[in-house]
Image: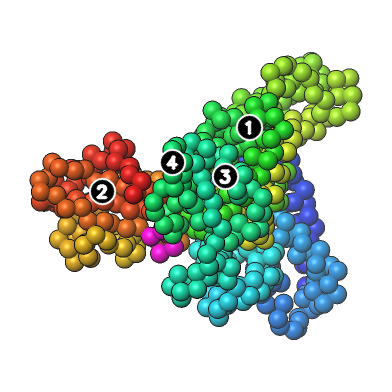
Amino acid sequence: EGDSGATGAIVLFIFVTCLAHTLIITDDIEIHEMARPLPQHQLRRCILLLKKLLYRACCVDDVKPHTDASVAVTMESNHFGLALISGASKTMRDLYDRSSRRPLCVPKLWLVEDLLEHDIRRCKSHQDYSLLLSAPVLRVCPFLVSFKRRLKIFERLVSTDRINIQGSNADHTLKPGVVVRIMRGRVLEDGLIHLNNLGRNLRQRIVVQYISQAGATETGVDVGGLFKEFWADLSNLAFDPNYALFRATEGSGNSLYPNPSSRAAHGSDHVILFEFLGRILGKALYEGITIQPQFAHFFLSFLRGDYNFLHMLPDLSTMDPQLYNNLMFLKTYDGDTADLCLTFTVANDDFGGNREVPLIPNGADVEVTNSNKQRYIGLMAKYHVCDRVREQSEAFTRGLWEVIDRSWLQLFNEPELQVLISGASDGKIDVSDMKSNTRYTGGYTGLDKNIYRFWNVVSSFNSKQQADLLRFVTSCERPPPLGFAIMNPPFTIQRVGIMRDGDKLPTASTCFNTLKLPTYSSEKILRERLLFAIQAGAGFELT
């Protein structure tokens, strides 16, 4: 029986190693449409097997003695066992990343039920959550833990660290913070001057004071809302493709990634701008502010710090579908590739002129043939997805990691990280959660008849109308990833008294997540006026 267990472990190791190497040259189309390297039902069986192996290695054998012969061979000596676990985790990570773009199985197939649930409940302090973050399962295979639990770990890491550094308003320990004076119309320039040199000190409380064009300080106390307004003003400028720092993908989604031509538009300062934007994104994550921009899949990989070069071709399909289709044609071309007259060069017109860039030394003299076309395809994808935006991506991540620890971000894959940044995008809003975490001001209470009518109206809205309402009030159409309880500032409804229904439309202070709701005479009028306001996109007020 011992020999049988050892043989099984060796066969598994060989299989995992072969699968990992085969996946290197296998794209998503081959997996989903051509059943390569295995039919999908067999891949799902592999996922189940490797999940059990990783769970045992990280959560069982890590704390329990080894008893049977197969574990003695794979774990007790450690050398073979570690090689098997390393290979299994890399293969599972590759399959999980591919599944994040185009599902290979139902989400629950990856999960181990209730994993880390009791550990999370035991954590009380930032140190406790930091120690939990070093657990083998979170370092090796975090995808075995449910996304909601990993979100909870991240939120508690951030919130406990924020309280330690900034203090708490509830406990009357709030620290004065760093005062930042921003002139309207100079959001980017003043932000660079006052915030960019703070580095890790951006974790401190930032108190924003807006200065009018006349030089007077605008009234208002910053309890989080003015920084949110600053972020909204800054992102509207910096993430606009016309500003030439970011570019939208040509494929589906219109997601953003660094503009390869940013140096031509902004000179050598473009690196400083990307570092600054990375720090400000980190600050938004640190303060629990949900933001609007949607980033390209491969750029989110850079933000995590472990881009998987096996996925360059699928990522290229979102950035430049035409080039991707051309490379796929070359990959499956049955004729003599030399007849296509290709060399190891790429035409670059990023800086206004058309020049040839060699993909390898003396690439202009190296012909693409049947024997080297796989290398050519890989180098072309790498150039467009990685090399052209490397400087910008590295600058952005340097800034981001100064505020948010890289290890915190590595709990998530790319779509999960996008949810962390800008909330869930499934179009559904939990109205009961929204209702239970709403504040009322100006004379409204939860028992007011107008509030009762408001929630009836919101419940009757379809998904798009609910998203439009949320964007009207908060500037983002998606709720926070862990629900409205962590929205900062909280969702608020303020009473506006009126004499006649036609006096006022609902308005919003997006910087404070506040809806200013007039006291309409009926539910029908409230619904009509609210829909008119949110669909017209009008009604923004600062205070």
Span shown in magenta: 485-490
Q: Which mark is residue 146?
A: none
Residue 312 at x, y percent in the picture: 69, 39
Residue denoted by label 1 = 259
Q: Residue at x 32, y 58 (%)?
A: 492
In the rendered structure, which disc, 1 or 2, sits on the residue that comes first in sequence? 1
Q: Which residue is mark 3?
A: 191
Q: Tell me the mark number nearer the camera, choosing from 1 and 3.
A: 3
Asked if the residue at tag 2 contacts the one at tag 1, i.e. Cβ–Cβ closer than 8 Å, the answer is no
Comes first in the chain, label 2 or label 3: 3
For residue 64, what is the image quadrant?
A: bottom right
Q: Position of residue 331 (x, y in %)?
A: 72, 29
Residue 466 placement, left or right of 282: left
Measure the C-alpha gap from mark 4 to mark 3.
Answer: 15 Å
Alpha carbon separation for disc pair 1 and 3: 21 Å
From this viewpoint, is residue 335 visible?
no
Please report whichever mark, 4 or 3, sits nearer to the chain's N-terminal start.
3
Pointer 4 residue = 212
Quarter of the figure with residue 188: top right
**Dot 2 crowding, Cα within 10 Å, few <14, some 14–19, many 20+:** some
Q: Nearer the viewer, mark 1 or mark 2?
A: 1
Q: Secondary structure at mark 1?
A: loop
From the top left corner, tell me how far across and down residue 513 is, in percent: 37, 53
